[in-house]
């Protein structure tokens, strides 16, 4: 029985998760795998998910996508980071950029040199020495791998895009590579009475689609993994209490900022995502602390331009499936869990889970060890991202509303507490090799949220005060020169990837 080959993959759901899965499996495993995807236009998709992180560039490279074509067809823009406004305290801002600040010297992270300078009375923030920050402030963007002859990495970036067009783009990619799409509503799911494995899904009471392996991409419904296979949901609302979002498009911004903005609100936060033809906005809030009407008024009152539609309400609960791969079914996307969109991580988790599933995908039914490994690694990744998100809420001086008082007083998970204590003591970060967020991300958000190291790495004392000042001055000069040579974000888009009709 266990050596029965896996020849047919059925993906249930055609949102971003379904079509990323279909595209990647088609590219890397078909043939020999036959792939069918079922989706229902009547049910539709969640329709949000427009900001990404740089790892998406790896997915595009694996799929062999042409970047300019991809950005043009999804009305995309470029993203250098996320600006957090009013998070640590009202009136304060910082940019979580996708790049390192400054230049590391003699194997010591730049922020230790900066900390030495600041402890001696220096007033410039770490971001004064960030290429991404300076480019963002001037709304500039270009493809820049390295900065001149300096040992400084160039601009790391991601995209903002229209979620519906992104799924459509991947759909045409996957269909061109042999994926068969079936339209219809899955109404029943048949299981093997002995093993409990899924045998088939039946649409509209008649058409049956059988498969050897299934991917559940049915979104929050979790039709296969949750309703059928009963994988429980681990609730993380005590740490990430937001459970509603109102989303609304508004007029296009000009100039186009090359970053997402996340502004703290009395019971949550508001996003602003600039696209070529419109701006995506949303208010993520906790219904225990704010009514929908209040949340809607705040959202509409804080748009930078006319609303183009009525706000749409979405409900969610932060957490994850206890088991992501159960029997012959793996959950990808919202069916596998949800971490709120503060750091734009959901599409990344889709991509990362698809990559992991492909890496461990079995040829035959004897896959217990692969499945266990998949579940372990996926759980770790969810937890690392969870801790990073909690940092934003927990490390704040805000006590102006009940929501913020709750957030600052909640005990964070032990894993996060240890990280905060280590950073606060010496500016060091523990090594989680697999952590999606690297040292530069943790450093920026720790500092941005007010976790300031009391000390720094003594190796940063190897240079004299004069050398330190010269080094910092040079870093800033290199950055200024590099930014001066970049085009405006709008100009870059106009010259390389302007969408039709914009
Ligand atoms: C408020 C909010 C903001 C977000 N912002 C971001 C962001 O900025 N960046 C980011 O990376 N992510 C973001 N996300 C997450 C992102 O939207 C999702 O990860 C992504 O869209 C994937 O969704 P999905 O494909 O899993 O589910 P869905 O889009 O809900 O797709 C589910 C699919 O299953 C199908 N389906 C369901 N039931 C059936 C059935 N019975 N029969 C047949 N078909 C069925 C539907 O038709 C649909 O095709 C956000 C999410 C929310 C809630």
Image (cartoon, rainbow, N blue to C red):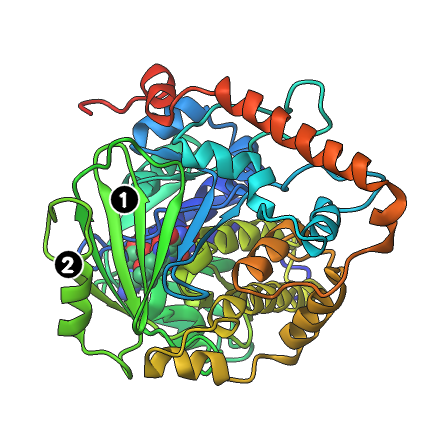
Whole-percent x and y of residue 445? 55, 58
Residue that label 1 marks: 164
Q: Of all residues shown, which one is farthest toward the top? A: 495
Is 194 above or below relative to 271?
A: below
> Which secondary structure lies at badge 1?
helix
Quadrant showing the N terminus: bottom right
Task: Residue 263: give its label.
Answer: none
Characterize the local packing of mark 2: few (<14), some (14-19) or many (20 or more) Cα atoms within 10 angstroms: few
> Which secondary structure lies at badge 2?
helix
Left or right? Give the position of 335 relative to 284.
Answer: right
Closest to the camera, between mark 1 and mark 2, is: 2
Quadrant in the picture for residue 154: top right
Is 485 above or below relative to 9?
A: above
Residue closest to the eye, 204 or 351:
351
Is 123 above or below relative to 288?
A: above
Residue closest to the eye, 254 or 366:
254
Residue that label 2 marks: 301
Residue closest to the eye, 354 or 166:
166
Residue drawn where x is 26% and y is 57% of the image: 282
Residue drawn where x is 53% and y is 71% of the image: 395
Ligand 1 falls in quadrant: bottom left
Left or right? Give the position of 5 relative to 319.
Answer: right
Left or right? Give the position of 265 relative to 438.
Answer: left
């Amino acid at each position: 029985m266990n050596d029965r080959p896996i020849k047919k993959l059925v993906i249930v759901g055609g949102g971003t998760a379904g079509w990323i899965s279909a595209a990647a499996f088609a590219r890397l495993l078909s043939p020999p795998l036959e792939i069918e995807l079922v989706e229902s236009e009547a049910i539709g998709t969640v329709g949000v998910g427009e900001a990404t992180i740089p790892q998406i560039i790896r997915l595009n490279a694996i799929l062999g996508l042409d970047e300019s074509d991809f950005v043009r067809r999804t009305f995309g823009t470029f993203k250098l980071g996320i600006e957090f406004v009013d998070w640590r305290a009202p009136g304060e801002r910082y940019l979580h950029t996708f790049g390192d600040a400054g230049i590391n010297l003699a194997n010591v992270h730049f922020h230790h040199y900066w900390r030495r300078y600041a402890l001696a009375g220096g007033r410039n923030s770490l971001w004064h020495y960030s290429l991404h920050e300076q480019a963002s402030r001037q709304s500039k963007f270009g493809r820049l791998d390295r900065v001149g002859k300096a040992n400084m990495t160039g601009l790391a970036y991601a995209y903002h895009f229209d979620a519906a067009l992104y799924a459509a783009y991947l759909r045409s990619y996957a269909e061109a590579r042999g994926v068969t799409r079936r339209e219809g509503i899955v109404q029943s799911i048949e299981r093997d009475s002995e093993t409990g494995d899924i045998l088939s899904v039946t649409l509209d009471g008649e058409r049956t689609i059988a498969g050897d392996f299934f991917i559940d991409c049915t979104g929050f419904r979790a039709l296969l993994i949750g309703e059928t296979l009963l994988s429980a949901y681990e609730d993380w609302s005590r740490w990430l209490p937001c459970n509603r979002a109102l989303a609304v498009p508004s007029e296009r911004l000009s100039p186009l900022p090359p970053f997402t903005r996340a502004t703290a609100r009395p019971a949550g936060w508001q996003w602003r995502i600039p696209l070529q033809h419109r701006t995506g906005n949303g208010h993520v809030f906790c219904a225990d602390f704010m009514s929908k009407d209040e949340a809607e008024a705040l959202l509409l009152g804080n748009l930078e331009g006319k609303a183009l539609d009525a706000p749409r309400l979405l409900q969610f609960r932060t957490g994850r499936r206890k088991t992501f791969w159960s029997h012959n079914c793996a959950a990808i996307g919202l069916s596998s869990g949800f971490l709120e969109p503060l750091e734009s991580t959901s599409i990344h988790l889709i991509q990362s889970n698809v990559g992991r599933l492909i890496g461990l995908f079995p040829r035959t039914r004897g896959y217990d060890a692969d499945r266990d490994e998949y579940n372990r690694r996926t759980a770790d990744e969810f937890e690392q991202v969870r801790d990073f998100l909690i940092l934003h809420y927990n490390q704040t001086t805000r006590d102006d509303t009940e929501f913020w008082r709750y957030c600052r007083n909640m005990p964070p998970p032990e894993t996060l507490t240890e990280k905060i204590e280590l950073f606060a003591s010496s500016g060091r970060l523990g090594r989680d090799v697999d952590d999606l967020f690297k040292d530069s991300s943790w450093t920026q958000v720790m500092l941005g949220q007010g976790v300031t190291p009391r000390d720094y790495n003594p190796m940063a004392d190897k240079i004299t005060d004069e050398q330190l000042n010269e080094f910092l001055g040079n870093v800033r000069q290199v950055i200024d020169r590099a930014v001066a040579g970049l085009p405006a974000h709008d100009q870059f888009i106009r010259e390389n990837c302007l969408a039709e009709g914009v």
